[in-house]
């Protein structure tokens, strides 16, 4: 296993309301030096929830995604707040975005997003034994909740509005998890 590069310095070179660009001066074990830039994410990470409604259905949401200027189908997601465990954040976000809470929450995997230039981490959480419960969220408009059948996963993968790589990864992990139980 290679030795990790030495980070000689870090500095913020640009800051917006939600993004920070950080410059890293790096020295590799062979003596080579490089300057890297990355988007610095918040310190707590985020959650993506895979809500299983019953033996035949799971839930998705359809909300506006400014990055692609379109309404997208995806699993519910949100930021983890200070001193909040991923499972608690998942249950809070689930209630804010779908109107359901979960009695059973299982952490499936922690994933990264474009790790070459983004420090963000996301926890994929399986939510089962759902019951109706809602919390007020920070969304600018009501979120559409979409019930989807497990036997129509191939149609979901082909759906033109289901493009988010994190949701596609979560769907594959869900299929794998369900095969094991």
Image (cartoon, rainbow, N blue to C red):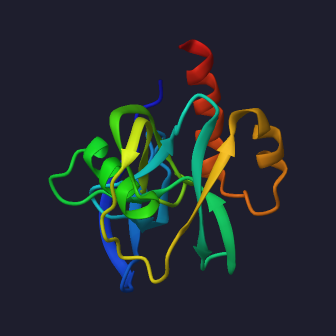
Give the total number of marks visible in the rendering.
0
Can you say whether 53 is above or below 106 in the image? below
**Residue nearest the observer in this picture, 175 or 110:** 175
Which residue is drawn at the image coordinates 53% and 13% (left, top)? Answer: 181
Q: Is residue 23 above or below residue 130?
A: below
Q: Quadrant of residue 134?
A: bottom left
Q: Hey, which quadrant is residue 161 in on the image? A: bottom right
Q: Is residue 143 left or right of residue 93?
A: right
Q: Nearer the viewer, residue 21 or 153?
A: 153
| Residue 88 at x, y percent in the picture | 26, 46
Residue situated furthest front in the rendering: 132
- Front residue of 165/51: it is 51
Drawn side of residue 87 relative to residue 20, left or right: left
State the image coordinates of residue 127 (x, y, percent, origin top left). 42, 38
Q: Can you name the residue that lies furthest to the left here?
A: 83
In which image quadrant can residue 73 be found?
bottom right
Give the percent coordinates (x, y) of residue 52: 52, 37
Residue at 35 percent of width and 41 percent of height: 102
Q: Is residue 33 above or below residue 155?
A: below
* Rendered position, 36 above or below 46: below
Q: Residue 114 placed where, x, y %?
A: 57, 54
Q: Which residue shows up at 35% across the image and 34% down it?
A: 105
Residue under the point 18% across and 59% down: 82
């Amino acid at each position: 296993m290679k030795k990790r590069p030495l980070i000689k310095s870090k500095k913020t070179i640009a800051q917006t309301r939600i993004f920070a660009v950080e410059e890293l001066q790096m020295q590799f074990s062979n003596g080579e030096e490089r300057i890297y830039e990355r988007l610095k994410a918040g310190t707590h990470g985020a959650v993506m929830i895979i809500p299983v409604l019953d033996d035949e259905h799971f839930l998705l949401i359809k909300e506006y995604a400014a990055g692609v200027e379109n309404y997208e189908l995806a699993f519910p997601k949100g930021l983890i707040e200070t001193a909040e465990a991923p499972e608690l954040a998942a249950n809070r976000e689930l209630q804010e975005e779908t109107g359901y809470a979960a009695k059973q929450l299982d952490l499936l995997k922690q994933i990264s997003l474009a790790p070459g230039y983004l420090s963000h981490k996301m926890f994929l959480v399986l939510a089962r034994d759902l019951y109706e419960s809602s919390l007020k969220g920070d969304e600018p408009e009501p979120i559409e909740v979409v019930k989807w059948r497990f036997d129509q996963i191939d149609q979901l993968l082909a759906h033109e509005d289901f493009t988010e790589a994190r949701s596609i990864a979560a769907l594959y992990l869900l299929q794998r998890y369900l095969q094991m139980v």
